[in-house]
Image (cartoon, grey):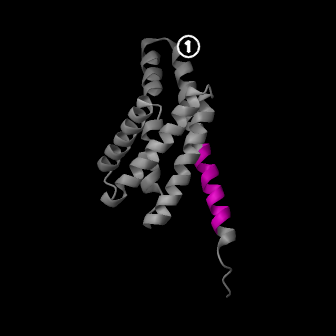
Amino acid sequence: MILYGIHFFFSFISTVAFGIITNIPKRSLLATGLTGAIGWMVYWLLRQNAQGLGFSNFVAAIAIGCFSIFFSRRLKMPMIIFNIPSLVPLVPGGPAYQAIRELVLGDSAKSLDNLKIVIMTAGAIAAGFMITSLVETLVFKFNSPIKKR
């Protein structure tokens, strides 16, 4: 149980720190931290239950997208304020670094393995955001009242 709290705490802190660095409004920091921490917890719990890397990132991106929509409507702010900092825990920085490092050292097989991880992770995150955006557009377009000309 303590391990869950540690993961939640550090993902919250990393999200808020990146939000401060990117100069998002102060009143959105708590919501952004919660969004990032929840996205990380979804990813981490799925990985702990033997789900694939791509699927875990995909579902976590959908969770981040849903919470970003919720907080953007609740706080009347653009959704991107919550999306971008919340992705920080999911970004595959380590494998990207390793891919470039192995490429420079001449081990192209390991470099391609790490590059495959980076591409799969980035693609899963992008697909999750696209699905969330599509669902948001469909839901709010069909739930809005029809305007007469």
Q: Amino acid at mark 1?
A: Ala
Answer with the quarter of the image where residue 136 lies: bottom right
Percent across and percent down for residue 2 are 41, 30
Closest to the observer, 24 or 39: 39
Measuring 56% from the left and 27% from the top, which residue is drawn there? 48
Closest to the observer, 37 or 68: 37
Q: Quadrant of the N terminus?
A: top left
Measuring 57% from the left and 44% from the top, which residue is drawn there? 126
- Circle 1 packing at 10 Å, graded few (<14), some (14-19), many (20+), is few
Answer with the quarter of the image where residue 143 lies: bottom right
Measuring 44% from the left and 67% from the top, which residue is drawn there? 76
Majority secondary structure in the magenta region = helix
Residue sitting at the far bottom: 149
| Residue 139 to residue 36: above or below | below
Magenta highlight range:
127-140
Measuring 66% from the left and 78% from the top, which residue is drawn there? 145
Closest to the observer, 110 or 91: 91
Q: Quadrant of the C terminus?
A: bottom right
Percent across and percent down for residue 142 are 69, 69
| Residue 101 to residue 65: above or below | above
Q: Secondary structure at mark 1?
A: helix
Q: Is residue 138 magenta?
A: yes
Closest to the observer, 37 or 120: 37
| Location of mark 1 (residue) | 109
